[in-house]
Amino acid sequence: MQPRIPRPTVVAAAIVALTLVTLTGLLAPALWYELIERREPGRLVAGGAGVVAIFVLYARLLWLNLMRRTAPVHSLGLAAIGGLCWVLPAVLGGDAGWGNLLMVPAGLIAVVLPLRHAVPVTAVGTVLTPVYGLLLGLPALSVLYEAIGFPITAFSGYVTVWLFHIVQELREARAELARSAVGQERLRFARDLHDVLGHSLQAVALRAEVAERFVDRDPPRVRKELTEIQTMARDAVRDVREVVRGYRATSLRTELEGISAVLQAAGIRCDRPAIPDLPAHVHEPLGWVAREAATNILRHSGASWCRITLAADSRVHLEIVNDGADRRSHTPGTGLQGLAERVAAAGGELAAGPDGDGTFRVRASVPLETRES
């Protein structure tokens, strides 16, 4: 089962927090040395203030760019971070871990700057950082680490933000597909309703015009036309009921094919079973179960897959399972309650609810034979 994806702000906050934890691990040896070994208040205050300023700027720039709130002024923030990371080791000494500051700006270069600018800036930083480290008197191993780690850190920062944006775009596309699928179903219903009522209403309007023309000179003709209008109106009402009934009581095969297409269009993988020949009385209640289950999956969960199974012995059993239980309310709605009543009226049983493993399961069964038989 695929893990649930939290809201974008939660993911962004987690990325920022983990980044700050990483920076803390990078700079903790330097602060520890100043606090425990050197014990010079002036140096400790300067180092602490500089680190706090770097952390605040870094977190702010990373958050804004994750939220796509980019601005040209962010390059000034990156320059300020770079300046602090180069000045502090020069003032406090490159030993005792302050040289690690030289790696800090790398993670933001490709996040803040456009890619066409980030590549040359990263190349320049990869060359100048180890050279500056040598001037500060850093050990050769630390200089080598900076030469290799600077471009890797820059690439890692770029990939992290890029993947975050890709996931959000896919999430938005999935929601749009679901809305589109529902919209297509509404259009199909509207088209069918128009086809049924268009001719009948036009005929009623024409008959009413004829009756109006003969209202004073031929009462028998008017009565005849009114009778025809009544007949047409009753036929139109019957046709509308047939259209609605067709949507409510279509064959189970049609329902399963329809919901499979709608769910797949919404980005939800749907496994549909082979459907055997079933008695007519089975189709209406199980068709309702299939339609209501699909509607709930689209409206109330963030499921990534749906599995439909169908079996028949003395009863016909339909089971629809999806992995969206953690993403929906577990309070039964009026749709499921009404569905249970319909299934019970057909002599069947309905059960719906979470399984405890992150899945939501709907089970329905109806007798294979009618009560009269």
Image (cartoon, rainbow, N blue to C red):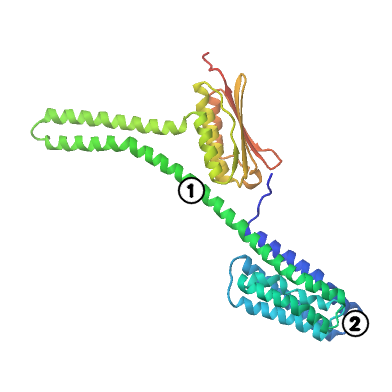
Task: Identify the amino acid type marked 2.
Answer: Arg
Residue at the spot 74% in from the left edge and 75% down from the top edge: 126
Element carrying mark 1:
helix
- Looking at marks 1 and 2 on the same chain, the residue that comes earlier in the sequence is marked by 2
Q: Position of residue 328 (x, y in %)?
A: 62, 46
Residue at the spot 65% in from the left edge and 68% down from the top edge: 63
- Residue nearer the viewer, 187 or 206: 187
Residue 317 located left or right of residue 183 = right
The quarter of the picture where residue 52 lies is bottom right
The quarter of the picture where residue 26 lies is bottom right
Q: Position of residue 57 (x, y in %)?
A: 69, 75
Name the residue tied to disc 1: 180
- Residue nearer the viewer, 60 or 90: 90
Residue 63 can be seen in this image:
yes
Find the distance from the CA under tag 1 to the CA under tag 2.
65 Å
Please determine whether, in this image, residue 218 is positioned above or below residue 74.
above
- Residue nearer the viewer, 246 or 304: 304
Name the residue tied to disc 2: 38
Residue 256 located left or right of residue 26 = left
